Image (cartoon, grey):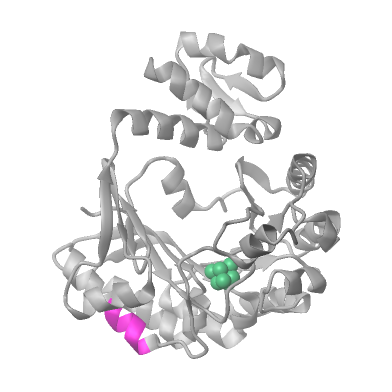
Amino acid sequence: MQPRHVYVHVPFCARRCAYCDFSIAVRKIVPVDEYVDALKRELRIRFGDAKPWVLDTLYFGGGTPSRLGGEGMSRAIDAVRDYADLSAGSEVTLEANPEDITEHAVARWRDAGVNRLSIGAQSFDDDVLKWMHRTHDASAISRAFDAARRGGIDNISLDLIFALPDSVKRSWESDISQAIALEPSHVSLYGLTVEPHTPLGRWRSRGELDEAPDERYEREFLFAHEAMTAAGLEHYEVSNFGRDGFHSRHNSSYWTGASYAGLGPSAHEFDGLGRRWNKSAYVDWLRDLGADRDPIEQSETLTDENKTAEDAYLGLRTVGGLLLSDAEIERTKPWIAAGWARLIDGNRLLLSPLGWLRLDALAADLTLLRSR
Ligand code: SF4
């Protein structure tokens, strides 16, 4: 299999954020040599005879890939490049926390091929950042933007989390306006979800967490839509906004059903027919590779039913929309009347922001119709 998109999971974080249930490895000192050696082994074991292999997108996510530093990231990219070439105009993204972004590190990343940074800002309010257990303060975000641009990367995406508890007293309007003022090329929004095995999950089970009501989730989502689109960032996917020419090509591959490879602990991979995923814990991934074993945790083949559900769900997520049959057009008339969707070209359904707030229900309804 030679997919044109590769995801590499780098699990290291300084500590766990209050809401995070990703596969991470908390390390004060990042074991760069150990990680890069294991990544090389995974590439050799799983893709040793892949050449010629040309990538359109390469994405380092985490965890916090920027904790590998300038030199470590450069070595991780070189490891991938030993097996796969980057196409001319390829998109190479690195997720970075603000405090890791220095002009020197960015210049090193850029020289290694990185041309897009995704910065985990989350909020511009110091009290909110403390509540989230983030390791940066608000001033680090604008410093990171300056350093990124001075280092030679100005394609910058920024992540924000919305729908926080009332008790946190966050001003969403202020955070959105400060995000826009930095002129990012892309913004990703995440509504706070409370997962059981996180500090937030524990606070909730002790009755110490007042989750945001649905109305506020909806109000903040719609406010972001209005403000971002007014600032020239197209709302092109339920959670993502981008300037013209700066939509995430890597993430778009997930939404269009393209195949992709996944390397590193917990990384998922899709070959068009099914998925496989790696062992989640860093030490388990490392142990398998140390024994020259594929670190696979499990695989699954998509059933027709899975595929129908995924097609509906993915199609409705983006402004690409979903092609409908005549019967489906009939079925969706009430959604259109409610302002949740519209038809273009006669048979392609696009959800509005109000529709995206009901995405799961609408996708389930269409899946049911298609499965009959
Ligand atoms: S930096 Fe990201 S991956 Fe690491 S703990 Fe925080 S949210 Fe999780």
**Residue drawn 70% across and 77% down?**
146
Q: Residue 320, image x and y in percent?
A: 52, 33
Magenta segment main secondary structure: helix
| Furthest residue in direction bottom, as rendered | 29
Q: Give residue 225's position: percent from left, percent from top.
A: 73, 43
Q: What is the quadrant of the C terminus in the image?
A: top left
- On the image, the x and y values in percent for residue 309 come to 42, 31
Q: Is residue 259 left or right of residue 97?
A: left
Task: Tell me which segment is drawn in magenta.
Answer: 33-38
Find ligand 1 in the image and state its quadrant: bottom right
At x 42%, y 59%, the residue is 89
Question: In the figure, 151 relative to 177: above or below?
Answer: below
Instruction: Reply above or below: 36 against 196.
Output: below
281 on left or right of 224: left
Of residues 2 and 303, the one drawn nearer to the viewer in this rendering: 303
Instruction: Tell which of 195 and 146 is nearer to you.
Output: 195
Q: Residue at x 29, y 38 (%)?
A: 302
Furthest residue in direction left, as rendered = 49
- Residue 327 in view, yes or no: yes
Count of numbered circles on the image = 0
Q: Is residue 61 above or below residue 108?
A: above
Question: Which picture quadrant has residue 226?
Answer: top right
87 vs 201, left or right, is left
Where on the picture, by quarter, is residue 229? top right
Q: Position of residue 295 (x, y in %)?
A: 25, 67
